[in-house]
Image: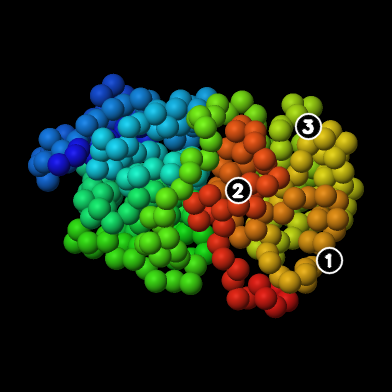
Amino acid sequence: MKKILVVLTGGTIGSRVEGKSIDVTGTSVYHLMDLYEKVYGGIEEFEVINPLSVLSENMDLTIWTSLCQVMWNIAYEDYAGVIVTHGSDTLSYTSALLGMLLSHVSVPVALTASNYPLGEKGSNGLINFRSAVELIHTRLLKGVFTVYQNECGDNNVYLATRIMEADPYRDRFGSFGGAAFGKMKEGVFEHICSPINPTIGQVNENRNPIARSCPEFNKQVLLIRPYPGLDYRFIDLNAKPSAVLHYLYHSATACTVGEGSSLPAFIERCNVEQIPVYTASNKNAQGRNYVTAGAVLEKGAIPMYNISPEAAYAKLLLLYNIGEDIEKKIDETIFFENLPVFHGQDSAQ
């Protein structure tokens, strides 16, 4: 039987508690493997590498480049699957990035994390890792997924391009559109039938790699989220990001009035600097939009439809650093990051 490759990257699942501090120290990342062997045995089925050890809130483009290079160069045909342990803070971002970068792989790649350090009361890290192992053992799927147990005990399996950042109160992750892709239950994968979910057959379709080689993330994308009182005059464009991604309110709107608070006015600034502005998540509303949404698009914003902030950011970052046919590929779905049109979008919002 082929082994499972485990890629340890740190995070809470690879941390230790020392005094009142939680940190990745020394060989703490390997504590997961020791604990798994004690509880479940079968440690011989793993090959373990530790390319980096970082708390995920400290992830930056340099670290992402290193991780992606490691993941890109894995000989996937030599393994039953791959598990990536990661910190929970930026799990959804790395999931989206790897979900698109590795959409072509022939085995399941499962990212997972932990809410609390291993061994602490209420920690789900070991359970999450076990669910990732069981998902690979089912031999049902290929592609990239994220496995994480919520506070209700559901061992959810998310499409990597749809998992959304955890809320800070319950540490609970969500799925863009509302439905996880499936669940692990007593070693069995249960697919969740939903109008927004692809079938297992669709997930397992063959895909071409998104690029000829793994990109280095030298070109940056500025992500902005709206809130009442946002003043664009505080945003300095002198550093010249390659693109701006402006996420929108749920109605695909943003403020269009005020001396410093108008998004159309900010887009005009970006146009002068020749910085493309993308907006998400836009809605397919058969031409019917709020006047504020229309005002944003009239200034030349490039819409991205039915996509989470994490996936939109990761997609732009990948496309700009790959540098090929951005205008064409921005509308192409790489690995289910764009949801199908919701029936409510067929009417006025």
Q: Is residue 119 left or right of residue 160?
A: left
As measured in the structure, the alpha-carbon distance from the residue carrying label 1 to the one carrying label 3 is: 27 Å
CA neighbours of label 1 inside 10 A, class few (<14), some (14 to 19), many (20+): few
Q: Residue at x 54, y 29 (%)?
A: 215
Q: Secondary structure at mark 3?
A: loop
Instruction: Say what amino acid the circle numbered 2 marks.
Output: Ala
Name the foreground residue: 77 vs 137: 77
Residue 326 in percent (x, y) is at 67, 41
Depth-wise, is mark 1 or mark 2 nearer the camera? 2
Query: Circle 1 sits in a helix, a strand or a loop, which is it?
Result: helix
Q: Position of residue 274 (x, y in %)?
A: 82, 35
> Could you tell me the amino acid type at mark 3?
Leu
- Foreground disc of the pair 3, 2: 2
**Observer-nearest of 34 and 70:** 70
For image coordinates 32% across by 37% down, the residue present is 76
Q: Nearer the viewer, residue 169 or 279?
A: 279
Q: Which residue is mark 3?
A: 237
Residue contact at pointers 1 and 2, CB within 8 angstroms = no
The answer to whether 346 appears left or right of 83 in the picture is right
